[in-house]
Amino acid sequence: MAITTPPVADESEAQRRPLIGPGMLVLFIALIGCFTAWGVAQDLTTPMVAGFKRIFDMSTFQASLVQLAYFGAYFLLALPAAFINQRFGYKTGILTGLGLAAIGAFAFYPASKIMTYEAFLVALFAMAAGCSILETSANPYVLSLGPESTATRRLNLAQAFNPVGTNIGVLLASTLILPKLSDPVDIGSLTPEQLHTIRAGELGAVMGPYLGLAFVLILIAIAIASQKAPPIVEEFPDAEPHEGGTRDLFGVLWRSKHYRYGVMAQFFNVAAQVCAWTYVIQYVQQALGGSLERGGFYLQISLLIFLGSRFLMTWLIGRVRATKVLAVLAFLAVVLCVFAMVSPNLAGVIAVVSLSFCLSLMFPTIYGVALKGLGPATKFGAAGLVMAIVGGAIMPLVQGWLVDETSPAISFIVPAVCFGLVGLYALYDLRGPDRERTAATAGSAA
């Protein structure tokens, strides 16, 4: 079923309106920097599961605590971020997020001197906590930087720079960190002094890109703080005040099966994404006998596919119902995972890399479909979908354990199951009682 389009006259009128309000260009560019920055932070961190396993000579399960620290912070900070925005405004929320993320990134310096895994996890948690507040605050702030009729286009433009950031993050890790960790070392043959020297050099390589990111975050914060705050346009204009209070709003959410199942689908979608990107490096090492650096190269290709596919999917769902595309891509991803499990070779690597094509549509489509029709409960519903990102903290631990017990190839059963559950949600939407439901709102959230 094709998504219906508004009258041509309305489209022409909207296109004539300015994309950005007068005097808001510098602020808009700074906010684009925010979208890019948290993309850099997330996918600069992804290759570090393999990196910390190499540095500290630990199991894959232990190394995957990196993702637990990062995405666990997203879960814990989603509601506090909402309260900050409600009490002090979105600009304060953004500056708080930037400041906390910068502190976390700077904390990599003392962590590299302390030279313990736990110190790096604390730094990662602080940085991710800041990114969680930043991400929760930035979307509605971007919407307020111009006419309401162009708000969706403005937000789409800003969000397009998030996958740009993910590619930059992996590129930094692949060129500045992983090459310095690629030489195998027989730890048992080293003296404590030699081991200390080697680890100090490797942890110093980890520290550098994060310190650079911290300075960039500070510059973005200065640019935003120096600009006048615009009047706020609500992110969800249909979310009118509710007379029953907060408890009744949560009741509205609980009674909506579309929302409840949507939160679960988002949990498994983010879980599949983080699993696929985190363990592509180990998969390449098994399938091709490659180094960390070579694995990082394939991860980079995967994210470039993700970037290009987002634009392709935005075009496609203007012509085909979004959940139809979601169902096809989810079950295609299951097939790719199973193929990678049974064929740990170059073809399997191509299958794993191709998972990014399937992932490109999932987050915004689930986001839009789950929030459709919630009315005054929409904002709390949006917070719940952000909290569902915790799937990226939990399921990589399961896959990491499987890597240790079996192999990287067999471990891809975990994202296969996750993709399958996302596909079931798409089928539920297609077969549900609301046959006219579309994911037209998905384009306004990523």
Image (tube, rainbow, N blue to C red):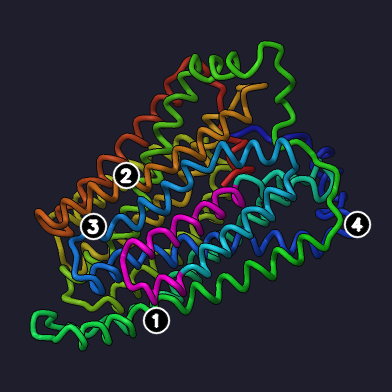
- Rendered residue at 81%/50% (across/down): 145
Residue corresponding to mark 4: 22
Seen in the image, is 418 located left or right of residue 27? left
Vertical position of residue 5 compared to residue 401: above or below:
above
Q: Residues within 10 Å of mark 1 (few under 14, many from 20)?
A: some
Q: Nearer the viewer, residue 167 or 66?
A: 66
Q: Nearer the viewer, mark 3 or mark 4?
A: 3
Marks 1 and 2, the one that precedes in the sequence: 1
Marks 4 and 2, the one that precedes in the sequence: 4
Q: Are marks 1 and 4 in contact (CB under 8 Å)?
A: no
Amino acid on which the number 1 mark rests in the picture? Gly
Q: Main secondary structure of the magenta part?
A: helix
Label of residue 204 in the image: 1
Per the model, the C-alpha gap separating discs 1 and 2 is 28 Å
Q: Which region is colored magenta?
A: 108-135
Q: Are marks 1 and 2 in contact (CB under 8 Å)?
A: no
Per the model, the C-alpha gap separating discs 1 and 4 is 45 Å
- Rendered residue at 13%/80% (across/down): 187
Label of residue 62 in the image: 3
Marks 3 and 1, the one that precedes in the sequence: 3
